[in-house]
Amino acid sequence: MSIGNNNPGDDMPDFSDVASGASSTAAEPAVTFKTYTIVAGDSLSKIAKREYGNANDWPKIFEANKDEIKDPNKIFPGQKIKIPL
Amino acid sequence: MKLVSQVTVVVATLFALVGCAKKEAPPPPPAPAPVAVAPAPDVVNVPVSVKQVVLGNQIGADKKVTAPATSFAPADTIYAAVDTIGSGKAAVKAAWTFHKGDKTAQVNETTQELTLAGPTTSEFHISKPGGWPAGDYQVEIFLNGASVGSQKFSVK
């Protein structure tokens, strides 16, 4: 899982290959997601490929963000979306 | 007239005998003693709050960090175990950042939306296949969008 929130060209390390996870002792299963900020060149299928290893899993991301994304073909740099883990 | 008197006496005697022979109804059972009933405990919905955040590179089955640490190796998986109390729905977020001078880079943000019913431990973890760059990091914990604390750590 990666996060693309680093500005290219600065001298900060690249954390785009960071993997994350979470779990809990709560009796009811938690809904767990990562926050991702859309960067130029992203598409839901591209993000799904990177996050899940399968571009066809993009509807999973779309479903989790229906309040933010109305058209899966229209996402914008800077948009913050949930990526279900 | 004498006969009438005798009959009256006999009848009266019979009534008296019958009256004596009649068994008395058993007395009603004593009223049960009042039983002290403990009042039902009040169901109190204690709002969810974060009790503590512990960092380490390993957790147990109870999701708690087995060996707390604030310094890590580049190959470590870094865990933040968040202990909460209270009950209800809560969104717990861990925001991991890297700090260099006055610059900050976002490393990861992960959220768990939980339905809590008492003390709970929730863990968040991050790893980096290429290894963590050495430097200063921080994890900030948010509860329902509000920051409730942060922990600094380093990678050496």
Image (cartoon, coloured by chain):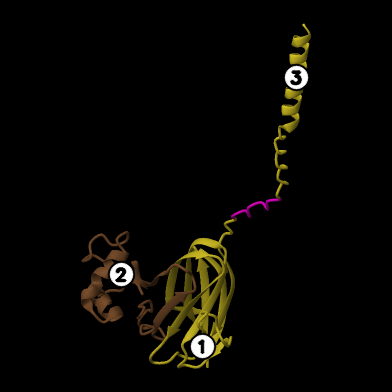
**Kind of residue at disc 3:** Val
Indicate the chain on which mark 1 is placed: B
> Chain letter of disc 3?
B
- Horizontal arrangement in the rendering, residue A37 relative to residue B40 (left or right): left
Question: How far separated are the C-alphas under marks 2 and 1?
Answer: 34 Å
Badge 2 sits on which subunit?
Answer: A
Residue closer to the observer: B55 or B98: B55
Q: CA distance from mark 3 to mark 1?
A: 108 Å
On the question of residue A55 being in view, the answer is yes
Is residue B101 in sight in this rendering? no
Q: Residues under labels 3 and 2: Cα distance?
A: 120 Å
**Colour for chain B in the figure:** yellow
Residue depicted at x 42% and y 92%: B131
Between residue B78 and residue B99, name the one nearer to us: B78
Q: Secondary structure at mark 3?
A: helix
Residue B40 located within the stretch drawn in magenta:
yes
Which quarter of the figure has residue A60?
bottom left
Dominant SS of magenta comes to: loop
Q: Are marks 3 and 1 in contact (CB under 8 Å)?
A: no
Q: Name the colour assigned to chain A in the rendering.
A: brown
Q: Position of residue B74 (x, y in %)?
A: 47, 93
Query: Which residue lies under the disc numbered 2?
Result: A77
- What label does residue B10 carry, if any? 3
Q: Which residue is mark 1?
A: B57
Q: Which residues are magenta?
A: B36-43
